Image (cartoon, grey):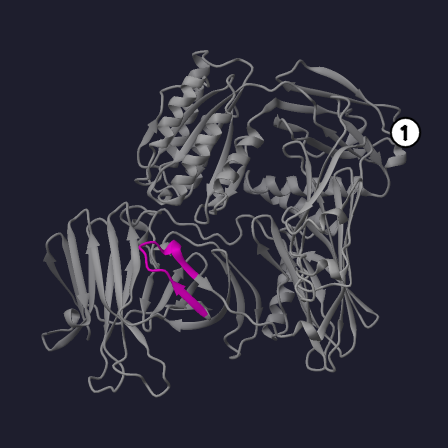
Amino acid sequence: MLIHYTWHVIVDLIQIKKSDSCRETHFYLLTFPSVSLSQVEVYSVTVDCTVTSRFAHTVMTSKAFNKANSSQEILFEVELPKTAFITNFSMEIEGQVYVGEVKEKEKAKKQYEKAVSSGQTAGLVKASGRKMEKFSVSVNIAAESNVTFVLTYEELLQRKLGRYELLTRVKPKTLVQDFQIVTNIYEPQGISYVDAHATFLSNELLPLVEKTAHISFSPTMEQQRKCPGCDGTLIDGDFIVSYDVKREKNLGDIQIVNGYFVHFFAPELPKLPKNVVFVIDISGSMSGRKIVQTREAMLAILQQVHEDDHFAIILFDSVIETWKDSLTKATKENITEAMDYIRRINSRGMTNVNDAVLKAVNMLVKDRQMERLPERSADMIILLTDGMPNEGESNIGKIQENVRTAIGGNMSLYCLGFGNDVDYSFLDVMSRQNKGLARRIFEASDAVVQLQGFYDEVASPLLLEVDMHYPDNAVDSLTTSHFSQLFNGTEIVVAGHLMDNDLDNFLVEVVGQGVSAADWDVFYPDEEYIFGDFTERLWAYLTIQQLLEKSKSGTPDEKANTTAKALDMSLQYSFVTPLTSMVVTKPETEDSTSSPLIADKLTEAYNYIPAQSYPRHYQPAPTYFVDGDPHFMIELPDRGDALCFNINDKPGTIFNLVRDSNSGILVNGEIIGDKKTPPDGKINTYFWRFGIVHQTLGVRLEVSTEDISLFQDGKWVKLLTVTLRDSVKFVILLHKVWKKHPYHRDYLGFYTLDSHLLSPGVHGLLGQFYHGINYEVADLHPGKVPEKPDATMYVKGQELNVTRYTKDFSLEGGTNVQSVVLGLTVFSVARHT
């Protein structure tokens, strides 16, 4: 018996677009707020941000008044950058202040789970798009009472493409009497330029934005209105402040306060030539929109390759294909030829990441040995892939080891993970092991812009192997001081603790490949511009970020030590990081006691369920099926979990269940309705016929309720197993209904076994889940039935209501199996005993 804890997805309205690709299946969730906005007045929303030497401290405050004559649940919801750490949250209700406390995640989790069992808790932080995460909390407020919410977070602004960017997302959802965004920027060396814009700024609102070191935006209620006399608000989107600082010297800028220093280094130097190998995945899963966007992006990128650079192109699926055997100088003629080559690429085959990357490494090594490349130049590999390795070496640990050994620290590897199905953590670790970084490319209309944007960031190296040397007897507790490369438009940041506050000068030696080594004396800046404890908190923020990165690789002992250090510092400085949680205690109400709420820090690879690599002789247990009315069940063995959802449509509708272009396998199913409309007016639908096509084997099979209803040796045959040679196995199960039933009919269930044998490019209502799914479950709370709690699920960009329950999903049938051969397809028939 297979017992699964299952998330049942409650979809209020589902529209299925009939096609052979389940990527065109759209889910629409209908939700209704429990509190009318007319009963709650949000009368103040302020965002107050102070940026001191790139370190941003943001305080978001919202004040609301319950106008109703009874208590109401009031929601506070904001979005903050994923790079930020929450440092504080508080609620003030009727003069009583409730303050959050940062605790170790495991301790907070126990407190959270204990409260969940009593039905009084909800999670606070959820993923929200590419750059943001959502913090939300609701609290019960008495009639005609006020509540004030205050959320504080901090982040170090990173310089990209020559500027710093501070993003604030504002969605008040109503007109606000007192609405204000204020940003104050303090940079000791001065600001070279500043700009502010917003996705919602109209021509009328634009003049309201002050653009100096003091940026403010405070529209009146009338100016917030979408139209004269209407209640809708224009304020809905991102408010973005961008700026850069004056740079008069190449030596950088050092700022010291309260015994801690921070050194910003962004010299103006000539660009180094680069030698780049583009390694592009053209496997079957890249078919359609992805391969089109990849072509468009590569055509644009090739036009940007500088004439002093050298480049190569490697395409891979099951086979490794090179444009040329070695790197080529980026002359106009070679760029034109490469663009013609890119225009002809198409998707096909499996995914051999290992051999493709090793081919790129060998190409760079050979060209170095043959002295075909400039001595002072940067070597890099840019890998673009959308799936899991499933050809050649498929063990991701072994692939990482092979690549690291081959590169040997002599070049950089940048990994771009295209779409939701990629194992991002695999690429992230592999890139960090090889002086690079990983970036997720989201499947969207702007994927071309995302790809080009990444290339722009790494297109212009200035220095390689940069070492920042500080006096050994003067500083300790340094953050990372060695950097593999420095790109134009970026900045190196090093922070540390001063052992002697009475230093008269501060000698720093900066050494890097690409420029003659030099000693630079850097003196204290004018301290009248520097205040507060920002340098210490900046140092702590940077140290924790770097420790978290180091904890992803290394020996088990190294991982444990860096994780322990990061945890200690997160607790000491009250940062909500992936190792800590903020616990907020809600006030008691008449029908409940005080209960904790938990705010966690999400990560990029959060809750990814990776596909497994299996040897040929091993058949894993996961089952994916559709049965009943139609009821889909997706087993997730790595999580001990399962997903379930129902799809209803008109009788006669044909759904695509599985489509694998690489192997030529296609499965469609047709639904049938009840014999007549039942008294409740709801017509149930069921699958009654399946069509299975294997184009490679030349097999077409149709199975219906009539075909499978065989009577042999005095027993009904209820199970039909279809095994496609060297590939997947399907099980079709017959459900017999009493012949004289006034409404219901016989129907079929469809089960998939050995789904790992299909390619990563498989689609369909079932097929889309075969190689893992990225999802998050949050806001666990009691449901209508005590043993079936409800929650919110975030999957494939959708927000769905779900219910957890336990159900038996074991297949019916006995063990007596009889095999019959038909063409190239084997049917195994099990008799029901």
Q: Position of residue 573 (x, y in %)?
A: 75, 49
Which residue is pictured at 70% across the width and 57% down the height? 103
* Kind of residue at badge 1: Asp
Can you tell which quarter of the image residue 473 is in?
top right
Is 19 on the left or on the right of 436, as rendered? Answer: left
Q: Which range is magenta? A: 13-26
The quadrant in which the C terminus is found is bottom left
Residue 637, visible in the rendered structure = yes
**According to the image, label 1 marks what residue?**
502
Q: Position of residue 383 (x, y in %)?
A: 45, 34
Q: Position of residue 481 (x, y in %)?
A: 68, 29
Is 257 on the left or on the right of 566, as rendered? Answer: right
Q: Residue furthest front?
A: 228
Q: Nearer the viewer, residue 451 or 327?
A: 451
Residue 16 falls inside the magenta stretch: yes
Which residue is pictured at 68% across the width and 79% down the height? 592
Which residue is pictured at 90% across the width and 29% down the height? 502
Height in image: 513 above or below 109? Answer: above
Height in image: 386 above or below 63? Answer: above
Can you tell which quarter of the image residue 135 is in?
bottom right
Is 509 on the left or on the right of 465, as rendered? Answer: right
Q: Nearer the viewer, residue 589 or 44?
A: 44
Height in image: 383 above or below 551? Answer: above
How many C-alpha atoms fall within 10 Å of the one at disc 1: few (<14), some, or many (≥20)? few
Can you tell which quarter of the image residue 331 is in?
top left
Residue 408, visible in the rendered structure = no
Q: Nearer the viewer, residue 809 or 684?
A: 684
Residue 239 falls inside the magenta stretch: no
